Image (spheres, helix red, strand yellow):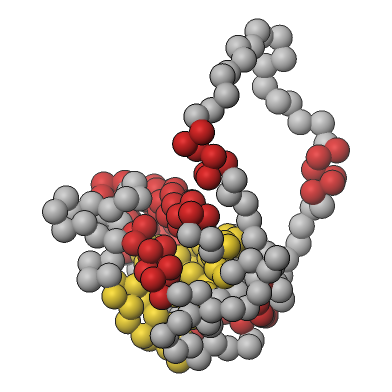
Amino acid sequence: MNLKRDSCVTFHWSTAITRISYVSRENIMRAKIDDGYPDVSSIEMPQPSKEINTQLGRRSVREFNGEPISLINLSTLLACYQHNPSSGRRVVPSAGALYPLRIYVHVKSVDSLSQGVYMYDPYSHELLKILEGFESDLKEVFFHAPMVETCSVILYITLRLDKVTLKYGDRGYRYGLMEAGHLAQSISLVAKEINVGTVVCGGFNDLKLGGYLNLDPTKEVVIYSMFLGLEDN
C-alpha cells in the first residue's frame, strides 16, 4: 500500500457502514445548540437578485414516477464534469486541477440506453459500459431506500485515492470530499433547470457497493451517490 494514502484509506474504511442508525431530526432540533454571537448587532440584507430564483428553488426529490429520462438530459448533467480541452479545466473546482473523481452511471430507465453501469469519460464525453443490468439487490446496498425502485438513474461518485494523494498526501482526501460536494451541487442545480429530480445519498454499504463496481478498496472508493428521475407529482 502507498504510505502517502495509508491514513485516508484507514479513515475511509473505519467510517464505512453496514447498517443505518440515526438520531431523529426532532431530537436534534430540540437540542440546545449555540448559534454563535447573540450579543452583537446585525445588519439586514437586501432581497437577493431574481436571477437566483431557480437555484433557491432547488430541493431534494425522493418520489419518482419511474419514467425514463432523456439521453440529452443525462448528457447535460454529466457535462458538469466534462473536460474543456481549450483550458484543461472543468466547471467544478478541483484542488490542483487533479480532478480525481469518477462518475459511474447506473442506468435503469434512460431513452436509447440499455440497463447497466457505465463509466463516464469526461475527456470524450462518452459512456463506457462496464456492467450489464440493474440488480434488484441494490435495495440492500442502500438499506432499502425506496428511491432505488422508482429512480431512472443512480450516479456513483468515486474518489481515486491514488490520484488525489499523489500531490497532497492524506490531506488530499479532504479535497476529494469537497470536490464531490461541488460536483453533486452542480448536477443538482442543472437538474433543476431541466426538470429532472435529484436527491443525494451518503447512506450505502461501502463494501457491497465497492465490490459491485469491482473497485480496488485501497485506490478507489465510492464517496457519494445521487438518484435521478422524473418527480412523481
* Figure check: 117 above or below 102: below
Q: Locate residue 30, reporting x and y percent.
A: 85, 38
**How many numbered discs?**
0
| Rendered-image quadrant of the N terminus | bottom left
Residue for point 50% across, 37% down: 52
Residue at the limit of the structure toward the left, as seen here = 86
Is 130 left or right of 43, judged from the image as shown? left
Is 14 left or right of 32, judged from the image as shown? left
Residue for point 60% across, 12% down: 43
Residue for point 48% across, 54% down: 193
* Figure check: 149 above or below 195: below
Front residue (pair 148, 3):
148
| Rendered-image quadrant of the C terminus | bottom right
Residue for point 34% across, 62% down: 79
Residue 141 shows up from this direction: no
Asked where in the image residue 77 lies, by quadrant, the reply is bottom left
Q: Locate residue 184, reporting x and y percent.
A: 48, 56
Q: Locate residue 151, reporting x and y percent.
A: 60, 74
Asked where in the image residue 29 lies, by quadrant, the reply is top right
Residue 43 shows up from this direction: yes
Residue at the limit of the structure toward the bottom, as seen here = 132
Is 65 left or right of 182, judged from the image as shown? right
Front residue (pair 41, 161):
41
* Figure check: 150 above or below 221: below
* Figure check: 231 above or below 56: below
Q: Locate residue 22, reporting x and y percent.
A: 76, 57
